[in-house]
Image (cartoon, grey):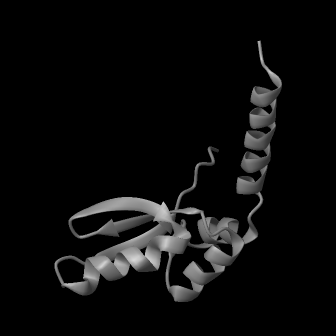
């Protein structure tokens, strides 16, 4: 049996899913470049649209995901000592066709 709190959480989750599916720039990146970010402008526009959008960061020695707002911070740490490099950045696309 659902209590009022659970119902509120479910409604919030549905709203969040709707918001995820209605992001014009995110959709543009997925359609035009398979989700890859090609430059700082792509990243800045993605942050303006949704600063918490998960971004996959692939490095020479591994990969991780973080919110779009944190990508620059983490990539600076990785490249600071020339111990690794950034291969590419891409947005998560959880949509199924």
Quadrant showing the N terminus? top right
Classify the position of the C terminus by image quarter: top right
Residue 57 lies left or right of residue 83; in this view the side is right
Q: Name the residue located 68 percent from the left edge and 65 percent from the top edge.
A: 27
Residue lying at the far left in this picture: please name it. Answer: 83
Q: Which residue is at the front of the view, 8 or 83? A: 8
Left of 36 or right of it: where is 29?
Answer: right
The structure residue drawn at horizontal position 44% and vertical position 71%, both measured from the top left corner, is: 89
Examine the rendered structure and indicate whether residue 55 appears above or below residue 73. Answer: above
Q: Does 84 sit above or below residue 2?
A: below
Q: Quadrant of residue 69?
A: bottom right
Tell me: residue 81, above or below residue 26: below
**Residue 11 locus on image (x, y percent):** 81, 37
Give the image location of residue 81, x and y in percent. Answer: 19, 84
Q: Nearer the viewer, residue 18 or 29?
A: 18
Task: Give percent across and percent down for residue 22.
Answer: 77, 59
Looking at the image, how many numbered discs can be counted on the residues? 0
- Indicate the position of residue 94 as horizontal and vertical percent values: 58, 49
Q: Is residue 12 above or below residue 44?
A: above
Residue drawn at (28%, 76%) of the image: 78
In the image, 64: left or right of 49? left
Residue at screen point 36% across, 59% down: 64
């Amino acid at each position: 049996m659902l209590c009022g709190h659970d119902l509120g959480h479910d409604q919030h989750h549905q709203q969040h899913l709707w918001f995820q599916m209605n992001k014009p720039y995110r959709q543009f990146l997925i359609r035009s470049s398979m989700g890859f970010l090609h430059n700082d402008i792509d990243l800045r526009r993605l942050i303006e649209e949704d600063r918490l959008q998960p971004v996959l960061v692939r490095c020479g020695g591994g990969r991780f995901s973080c919110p779009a707002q944190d990508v620059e911070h983490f990539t600076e740490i990785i490249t600071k000592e020339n111990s690794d490099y950034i291969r590419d950045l891409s947005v998560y696309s959880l949509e199924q066709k």
